Image (cartoon, rainbow, N blue to C red):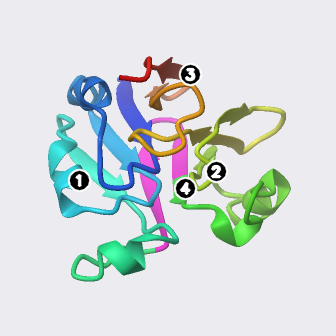
Amino acid sequence: MSVSVAIVSDTHGHLDRRIAEVIRGCDYAIHAGDICGQEVLEAMQPKQSVVAVTGNNDPYCMAEFPLPEIRELHLPGGVVRIEHGHAHGHHSPCHDSLRDKHPEARLVVYGHTHKMVQDKTRTPWVVNPGAAGQTRTYGGPSCMVLTANDHDWEVKEYRFSEE
């Protein structure tokens, strides 16, 4: 059995409509923080459920909807651990620090930098989907989709033009 997981972060109150469409085609969706609005989570409509964590800006804009700092998603073939990442280095979170904090994971998802990254140099893999909104998208809103089964995991990147 294979499942698909949309991975987004750093919407800052706006979810790009094209990314919302990618999410609708997936079984699950992950939001790695700096959501900045319950309407963003409501716009995320995967087939199953959304797993979201708080970002460093969310305490100011989502105080009425508090979220945990770390979550996990159990999938065929392993566990995804999610956190915003700002606690591991403000401008450039340390992937070794993220790996050390989540050694049981197959994949660690973080946000914060707004820059898309896939680090598969060792396990757990560490990925950042970039920014899925309008703020500091570095070339356009972006997201990732993880396809996972008991044996193989693949992460595909999506980047859309600025509107």
Please tell me how crowded label 4 is: few (under 14), some (14-19), or many (20+) other residues with Cα within 10 Å: many
Look at mark 4 in the image and give the residue it sits on. Answer: 81
Percent position (x, y) of residue 122?
A: 82, 38
Whole-Å distance between the Cαs marked 2 and 1? 20 Å
User: Which quadrant would residue 126 be assigned to in this image?
Assistant: top right
Mark 3–mark 1 CB contact (< 8 Å): no
Query: Does the stretch in magenta take in 78?
Result: yes
Looking at the image, which residue is at 28% across and 28% down?
A: 26
The secondary structure type at the circle numbered 3 is: strand
Q: Earlier in the sequence, mark 2 or mark 3?
A: 2
Over which residues does the magenta segment extend? 69-80
Percent position (x, y) of residue 154?
A: 56, 21
Q: Which of marks 3 and 4 is nearer the N terminus?
A: 4
Label at residue 41: 1
Is 141 in front, or is 42? Answer: 141
Looking at the image, which residue is at 28% across and 23% down?
A: 18
User: Which quadrant would residue 134 be assigned to in this image?
Assistant: top left
Look at mark 2 in the image and give the residue it sits on. Answer: 113
Q: In the picture, which quadrant includes the C terminus?
A: top left
Quick check: 59 left or right of 114? left
Percent position (x, y) of residue 9?
A: 46, 48
In the image, what residue type sits under mark 1? Leu
Whole-Å distance between the Cαs marked 3 and 4? 16 Å
Name the front one of labels 2 and 1: 2
Q: Which of marks 4 and 1 is nearer the N terminus?
A: 1
Whole-Å distance between the Cαs marked 2 and 3? 22 Å
Position above or below: 163 against 51 = above
The secondary structure type at the circle numbered 1 is: helix
